[in-house]
Amino acid sequence: MKFNIVVKRVLFLAAIIGLWQLVFSINVFADVVFPSPGKVWTALYEGFTQGDFVKALGASFKHLFAGLFMAILLGTIVGVILGKSKQADETAGMYLIALQSIPSIVWVPLAIMLFGFTEFAVVFVVVLGGTFVMALNVRSAIHNVPPHFVRAARTMGTSGFGLFYRVEVPASIPYFMSGVRLSWAFSWRALMAGELLSNGPGLGYSLRYAQDYARMDQVIAIIIIIGLIGAIVDQLVFSKLEKNVMKRWGLVK
Amino acid sequence: MFLELNHVGKTFTDEEKQSSFEVFSDIDINVSENEFVSILGPSGCGKSTLLSMIAGLESATSGSILLQEKEIKQAGRERGMVFQQPSLFPWLNVRDNITFPLKGIMSKKEANERADHYLKMVHLSRFKNSFIYELSGGMQQRVAIARALAMDPKVLLMDEPFGALDEQTRHILQDELIKIWQETQKTILFVTHSIQEAIKLSDRVIVMGTRPGRVISDFKVDIPRPRKREDQVVIEHEKKVMDLLEGEIKKVLEEELSNEIQYSR
């Protein structure tokens, strides 16, 4: 990253924190509902040193990875079936779009009724949050395999299953990667929705717990953690992966 | 005959619209071994479709296509094809692209040796570990030629392989192709819409007309190689083909214009 971009970003952040401190200092809101930046920083610091946030983060990541893994797996299977079979696509494709448009928090009551206040209920919501978007992307991936690749492969004596796994699968990887990235983003949102209404442990649960005890400093601290993790994972992991794949596949110069 | 097209016809039918379109019918072409034959024609004459049918990517609606007395029913390694787009696989490096069709029919070591041999032939040995996006269009097309040759096909089918390249690169690759042809003694069927390209490269030129697609001329080009564009004989040949095609091109234009008039009414 260029130095002046870093400078711009740091200055912007400093301005926001300055404004925050200013609003706090002139006492617009009561201290209970509007903590100072310093207090939030302390909450963050204590949360990590005393281990509460670390434990919550650990639990959240456990739910996330279990759910995301299942979502990618299921989404890929469903996507391949819909992508390869016109029959299946005509029958079920529409419903997949309908399911995808349901916000994941809607699944929470269902999950709680089915599985009670368990961690499995949270994972279930995460799976539902990530599967449909993954399936839709894998379906597009298969539909968008360039026909000239398939024609070229056929003239080289490739057909049937060989054509699928030696040409269609690797040709699908750019869309597959976009699917994984979106699936992660949707799962992360679903995770927070699920945990917020769960009985813990997890970052979402800690957030509600802090709210119940009117610890606004902790609430804001956790919101910051959630946003930060979302940005870091997206930028450091998925954006980079996607960019590399796109470059290699000749989709960007 | 080595490659035989007997009364070959192709009709595309659109089942939804219940309409059909006859691209061509009753095409008879014979090609002998080691011959370099160009199929030349205006767009829409079905020359690419014809080549796809020989490749086995499309089926003939009528007639039959025989290679060494055996009917062609599907695509196969004994007919290598080079498309206008290089169609190389970006997830493989240059060498793995060339060994792609060899997997399962020979050991990895043999396949690599063979790839290296053909990479040398197209002067790309230095790039064997490169990825496709690192190569220029002309280089990619040379890899595609090496890939087709590495299967050791009986016929090399080329569908406007240099059509997307710039003039300079095209001339270089044409010269290279002639050298490769002389070295490998392959039978080549070369589809193009460029009269110059057809005259420069081939032993024989088949000129196709359009609507309906048909063969309007089939003649030998007896000019010693290397051929120079400014040679009088070359120019005479080009002129002859130009005269043949003039009527066809006019026909296409007139039809398009009359469509235009119908629409504007």
Image (cartoon, helix red, strand yellow):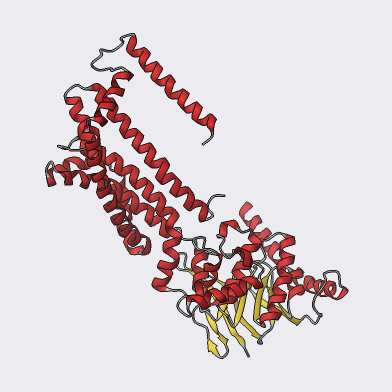
Residue at the far right in the pictured view: B232
Q: Quadrant of residue A219?
A: top left
Q: Is residue A150 left or right of residue B26?
A: left
Which quadrant of the figure contains the N terminus of chain B? Answer: bottom right
Q: Look at the image and tell me whether residue A71 can be seen.
A: yes
Q: Is residue A18 above or below residue A49?
A: above
Q: Is residue B23 visible?
A: no
Closer to us: A206 or B7: A206
Q: Nearer the viewer, residue A164 or B152?
A: B152
Q: In the figure, B126 relative to A237: above or below?
A: below
Residue B162 in picture, x, y percent from top left: 67, 65
Location of residue B244 (image quadrant): bottom right
Counting the numbered discs, the total is 0
Q: Which residue is more in the foreground, A141 or B237?
A: A141
Provide residue A74's location: percent of width, then percent of height.
28, 56
Residue A124 in picture, x, y percent from top left: 21, 47
